[in-house]
Image (cartoon, helix red, strand yellow):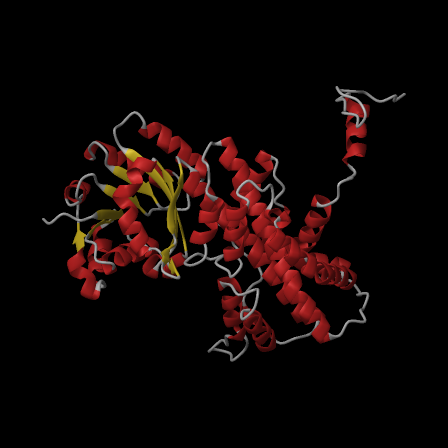
Amino acid sequence: MSNAEIGVIGLAVMGANLALNIADNGYKVAVFNRTYARTVEFMKSAGDLVDQLVPCETLEEFIEAIRPPRPVIIMVKAGEPVDMQIALLKPLMTDDDIIIDAGNANFRDTLRREEEMKSTKLTFIGMGVSGGEEGARHGPSIMVGGKQTAYPRVQTVLEAISAKYKGEPCAAWLGENGAGHFVKTIHNGIEYADMQMIAEVYGIMRDRLDMAPADISKVFAKWNEGPLESYLVQITADVLKAVDPKTDKPMIELILDAAGQKGTGRWSAIEALQMGVPATAIEAAVAARSLSAAKDERIHAQDILGLPSGGGSSSSKNDIIADLELALLAGKIAAYAQGFAVMAAASKEFDWGLPMPTIAKIWRAGCIIQSRFLDEISTAFSKEPDVANMVITPSFAKMLSDCDGPLRRIVSDSVLNGNPIPALASAISYFDTYRRAQGTASLIQGQRDFFGAHGFKRIDEEGNHHGPWS
């Protein structure tokens, strides 16, 4: 049997598409699935790529088919199935072979697995892959974490199969152990926030401006030609113009308004809270999905409470739409700024040395949150790699200045008229809190000292102090 350059375990949609992508780029790839019938089915559908694929019925045959040191990509359900697969592989693999978990793993599982692998002579890589089914097949964004010495063995293949932005591969080694999966987690947190804000803007046009889906679609399509150009804005326009072939009604009006989630957005919010880094847009988006799932409760609440009567506004429809564009841009900036701040904190805590400009670059194509201003983010961090927050860099400070009024008007109008905007509202509160030198936490410190004698720092003296409470 001729040696494959790499192997893929798990031939569900993502694994199958990744294997075909590798084969399509000229590399021979060994494939294995727990049920061999699935492997046979996969080979029948491979078409012209069948000669680049090495189907294997047993794990022993699979390992033997790969050129040493053997890189093996695991594409199975996150959690226990990954641990089970690793346990089966360990006895079969030899020195310097590489196990690559390319699923949506919790980075803390990746830390554990990498630590457990130290007792062997194998190498473990945690690899974030973004782009969904289409990305896996034709070019995803790839975020690699693990031993840097192992990366050259897989670098050529990963760069070849990744998305390209102006010829640059959207794949990179980002740091040791869990770095790759952590960056992927934050990517998904930003994705949650971005999607939520887009949904809020859609809701304002639907409920506040009484616009039909087809007309809202045209607005998003126009926005996609400007500063908001991004994959999510583009597909929003496509979703909103789609018509159900069964009823001829707008498809969006037939979709139940209860959003699912697989956990990565929640992980982002949890890690941000644990590190003490505010990620309010992500938190709001996670909470909004949870509220959306409580459909029956919301129906009952509307029956009891009714909808707000609305406060009206003197703004015209065209003025509101113009403000919505810049308000959404401001919200996106907040989501990205918070996500990068969380990554910066994790980079210090785990000593990863995350390359922020590189992360922005590999997100410019292939991934779900690809957008025009990722170039701006990359440039901002290249010029000021240690900046505390990207919103205070010159380019983003200027953007926020331009967006400030529109965001305030949209948030104010939405509150007055009862349009839910948890993520957009969190963005303006975040900006206002971040840029106010004199905040209100002095009162919180006084309260904490009053009921718990926790003490506080004075602005005019050193040391820990207590108040003259009775």
Whether 385 is drawn above or below 40: the answer is above
Query: Is residue 435 rendered to the left or right of residue 446?
Result: left
Whether 271 is drawn above or below 47: the answer is above
Residue at the extreme right: 470
Query: Is residue 243 rendered to the left or right of residue 210?
Result: left
Residue at the extreme left: 1
Q: Is residue 285 visible?
A: no
Viewer-nearest residue: 169 or 323: 169
Query: Is residue 174 rendered to the left or right of residue 97?
Result: right
Q: Give the image location of residue 420, x and y in percent.
A: 69, 59
Viewer-nearest residue: 468 or 397: 397
Residue at the extreme bottom: 248
Tell me which corner region of the image, top left, top right, bottom left or bottom right, holds residue 461: top right
- The residue drawn where x is 51% and y is 33% is 348
Q: Quadrant of the C terminus?
A: top right
Viewer-nearest residue: 431 or 459: 459
- The residue drawn where x is 19% and y is 65% is 48
Tell me which corner region of the image, top left, top right, bottom left or bottom right, holds residue 407: bottom right
- The residue drawn where x is 79% and y is 24% is 449
Q: Count every numbered label the image shows and give the total.
A: 0
Q: Give the image location of residue 190, x and y in percent.
A: 54, 51
Q: Is residue 142 visible?
A: yes
Q: Give the image location of residue 235, x and y in percent.
A: 49, 67
Q: Give the image location of residue 336, x and y in percent.
A: 56, 51
